[in-house]
Image (tube, rainbow, N blue to C red):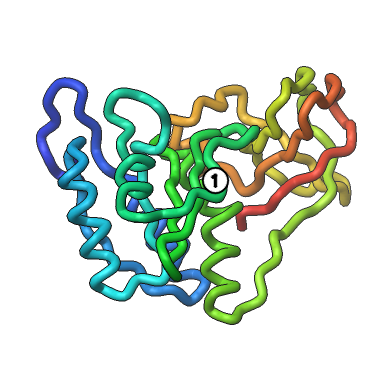
Amino acid sequence: LPPGSDLGPDQIISSNAFGVAAAARSVGASALDLGIAPDRKEAIATLVEQAVDAGADVIVTLGGASVGDHDLVHDVLTGEGMTLDFWKIAMRPGKPLMFGRLGDIRCIGLPGNPVASLVCTQLFLKPLLARLGGRAFRQDMRQARLGAAMPANDLRQDYVRAVVKEEAGTPLATPFGIQDSSMLKMLADANGLIVREPFAPPAATGAACSVLMLR
């Protein structure tokens, strides 16, 4: 529901669109918010058709891209003629990410969880929009030392929210203890994402790490 609404059972405030739109504007794109679609295929299809009629270069959907009973975006977009390039990738947060083409329009389906949505926006949507607009884009990757030990990783590439600060002339990246993809405050407080490769071994405090800076 929009901010300011009274929530009923199983309802949440829609916060993702604001961050995604701001990120789009930061790389020179214009964002047109077509609103919230209920979990019905015909309602989602109507908004997709409105985006096409508006001359969109990119259609961005928020949520509904996984495989639950109410995750209908894939079916709707392919039903409208989208050719799927990829769907679900080995990263955390952001596994349900989807990308395809509807004619000349790029379609990107972002996860519904707030942190996953914004991390995927940083990694995929911002570079896409910048390049489509003829602008250079490069992620701000830096080397740092870990401010806390980290366990071994599994098969997914992790983007771990962290605070990066200089200590004795050395960048120190300290991960937050809670990394749940619904915890938006941790992303708001973070200024970097520690990048952990798939199957990375345990890393001790002080070990070298790669960090994608957010600001």
Q: Residue at x 82, y 26 (%)?
A: 200
Residue 207 screen position, x and y as percent = 89, 32
187 vs 140: above or below? above
Q: Nearer the viewer, residue 23 or 99?
A: 99
Question: Would you say 148 lies left or right of 192 here?
Answer: right
Q: Nearer the viewer, residue 115 or 35?
A: 35
Residue 99 screen position, x and y as percent = 50, 50
Q: Residue at x 48, y 39 (%)?
A: 115
The residue under label 1 is which amino acid type?
Val
Q: Residue at x 27, y 57 (%)?
A: 48
Whether residue 2 appears in this view of the structure is: no
Whether residue 37 appears in this view of the structure is: yes
User: Residue 196: which quarter of the image?
Assistant: top right
For label 1, count other residues whose C-alpha is less than 10 Å away and answer few (under 14), some (14-19) or many (20+).
Answer: many
User: Residue 34: which quarter of the image?
Assistant: bottom left
Q: In which quadrant will I find the N terminus?
A: top left
Q: Residue at x 45, y 70 (%)?
A: 104
Question: Would you say 26 lies left or right of 144 here?
Answer: left
Residue 149 screen position, x and y as percent = 79, 22
